[in-house]
Image (tube, rainbow, N blue to C red):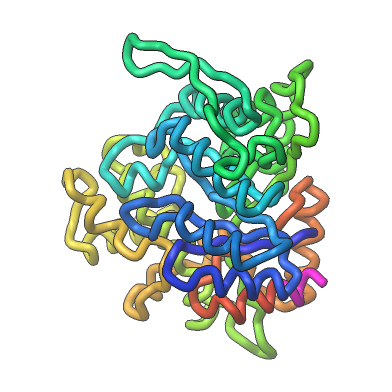
Amino acid sequence: MRAGVVVAAHPGVEDLAVQAEELGLHSFWLNDTPMVHGDPFVALALCAKATNRIRLGIGVTSPALRSAPAAASAFASLNALAPGRIICGVGTGNTARRTLGMRPATVATTENFTAALQNLCAGRTIEYREGDRVRNVRFLHTGGHANTADPIEFVVAALGPKAAAVAGRRGTGLISFGLLDPAAWQALHDARRHAAHDTPRDPGSRTDSYVVTALHILGEDEDPYGDAARDATGHLVLSLLAFAADTAADAPAFAEQLGPEEREAVRRLLDRRGTTATAPDRHTKLYPDYLGRIAPEDRDLILPSLMNTLALVGTRDDLRARVTTLEQAGIDELLIQPVADPPAEMAELARLLT
C-alpha cells in the first residue's frame, strides 16, 4: 500500500513536504479549513516549488467555501508549478463550514461543483450561474499562467453511499476520514461502482481510494492507551467528539449512534469548553486548534473505543496485518495526519509500509 501525509497549512510546511518526499511517501496533502488553518493553496505552491516528485493534494475544498472558477484557477495554477502532481479533493465542507457556524453544502451541489472543476481544469467551457444570471465561462489564458494540459486527479470525500455515488458518476477517487472498517469501504466501493455504470471517463483519470487516520507504533510493553498513544491519536478523537457536540441539537442522529461512554465524553467536552449544544456561538468554543496537538488535560477524553475506531495503534506486526486487511478492502493509500511529532510519525509510516 502507498503512504502519504495530511497536515495543516503553516509557515515552513514546505520543509515537511521535502521530508515526506525524501522518505519516499507518495502524496502530501493540506486541509482546507479557512478559519482554523492557513491557506492551503498558498502553502501548497511553496511545496510545489520545493519538491520534484511527491503528489500534492488539497483535502478537501468545497463549493460552500469557493466558487468553481476561483477554485479551478487555484488548482490549474498549482498544476503549472507541479505539472501532473496535483490532487483536488472535493467534499461538502462539513468541518470547514461548521467552524463558521454554518451547514455544509448538499451532495447535489458538491457534485455540480466537482463537474465544473473537472471541466474547467481540462480546458472546457462550463455554464456558470449566479442567481438567475447564467454565462459560459472558461480559462481565457493558460500557458504559463494555468496548466489545463496535464491531468489533475480528483477525489470525493465520502463516509456514506450518496457521496460515493458522486465519485462513481464523476469518475473520481474516494477519500475518507477515520474510516478503518473494511466492510464500510466495501459499501463505498459498491456505491461508486453501481453509480459509474456507463459513465464516460476522461483519459488518464484515476479512481484511487485514500483513508486518513493517525498512527502510533507501540514500543515494547508500551500501554496502547497511554499518554504517547493518546497524544498521537487524540486529535482525531476530539474531532469526532466536537462534531457530535456541535450537531447534537440540530442533527442528533450521529450523536445518538454513540455509546454511553462516548456521549458522556461529549457532555464533558461541552462543559470543558464552556458552551452548550444549542449555543449559537458554540463553533467558536469547539473548533479552536482543530486537528492540532491535544492539551494534556484533555487526554481523559481520548477514549480507547474511539482510538480503536479511528486510528492505527499497535505493534509493527499488528499494524501491518491491519494495513493488509485495508488493502484487501480496496484502499490504495494510507494517509496519516501527524501532530505530536510530524517528522518522526512520517518516518514511522515510511518504515511500516516498506
Residue 137: x %, y % from top left: 49, 20
Residue 17 left/right relative to 220: left
- Residue 71, image x and y in percent? 48, 38
Q: Quadrant where the N terminus lies? A: bottom right
- Magenta stretch mostly in which secondary structure? helix
Residue 48 visible in the shown view: yes
Q: Is residue 46 left or right of residue 281?
A: right
Number of marks in the rendered image: 0
- 351 in the magenta segment: yes
Q: Give the magenta range.
A: 350-354
Q: Residue at x 18, y 56 (%)?
A: 275
Q: Is residue 87 above or below residue 321?
A: above
The residue that appears at 70% across and 36% down in the rendered structure is 149
Q: Quadrant of the C terminus?
A: bottom right
Instruction: Pinpoint residue 338: horizontal percent, then vertical percent.
Output: 54, 70
* Image spot of residue 78 (x, y percent): 57, 49
Horizontally, residue 51 falls left or right of residue 35, namely right
